[in-house]
Amino acid sequence: MKLSVIAAGRLKPGPEKSLADDYLTRAQGLGRKCGISRIGVTEFNESQASSAAARMTEEGRLIAGTLPPKAFTIVLDERGKALPSEAFAELLRRHLDGGTGDMAFLIGGPDGHAPETRETAGLILSFGPMTWPHRLIRVMLFEQLYRAVTIIAGHPYHRA
């Protein structure tokens, strides 16, 4: 299975990027042993449209244009469903075992996701009800992907 992270906004050099890159590298390495052939990241500039609705629509079009065909999409949004790490790992395992070819994690801009993006998602996932900066969400997502593959692989990183 191939994983894609598609994000509005670019992660600039700094401590968040270093930490995100570290977890991404770890997840890619161990992920190959679990059947995850690649974790790709696509990012684009946030929309500069004059209204929040127009920005979300423009970013939604960019996200939709980048999605792999038939990808199972997971929208990251504070209003989504919060999963424990074990349940997140089980979600990945089910898709790996079920033959899902592509899974995409979608990170919207500061205004959130367009309604169409949310409506077509396979899952709306929350890292809690608080609003998190986009720089940190990437770190948190990559850490959880790494944690999930360690759970799947039986690696001792995750200790409940």
Image: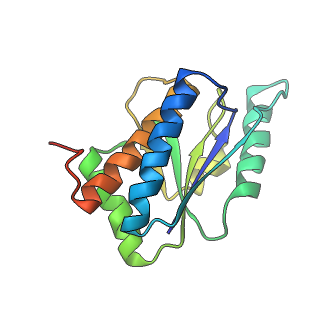
Which image quadrant for residue 8?
top right
Q: Is residue 7 left or right of residue 147?
A: right
- The number of numbered discs placed on residues in the rendered structure image is 0
At horizontal 51% and vertical 67% (from top left) the residue drawn is 37
Q: In which quadrant will I find the C terminus?
A: top left
| Observer-nearest of 118 and 94 | 94
Q: Above or below — where is 17 with respect to 146? A: above
| Observer-nearest of 134 and 80 | 134
Q: Above or below — where is 151 with respect to 18? A: below
At horizontal 37% and vertical 31% (from top left) the residue drawn is 128
Q: Residue 33's x, y, as percent?
A: 38, 66
Q: Please, which colouring scheme is shown?
A: rainbow
Q: Above or below — where is 160 with respect to 139? A: below
At horizontal 53% and vertical 25% (from top left) the residue drawn is 16
Q: Is residue 79 visible?
A: no
Q: Residue 15's x, y, as percent?
A: 53, 22
At horizontal 28% and vertical 61% (from top left) the residue drawn is 152
| Observer-nearest of 64 and 50 | 64
Q: Residue furthest left?
A: 160
Which image quadrant for residue 64?
bottom right
Which image quadrant for residue 113?
top right
Q: Residue 105's x, y, as percent?
A: 54, 50
Q: Is residue 69 left or right of residue 143?
A: right
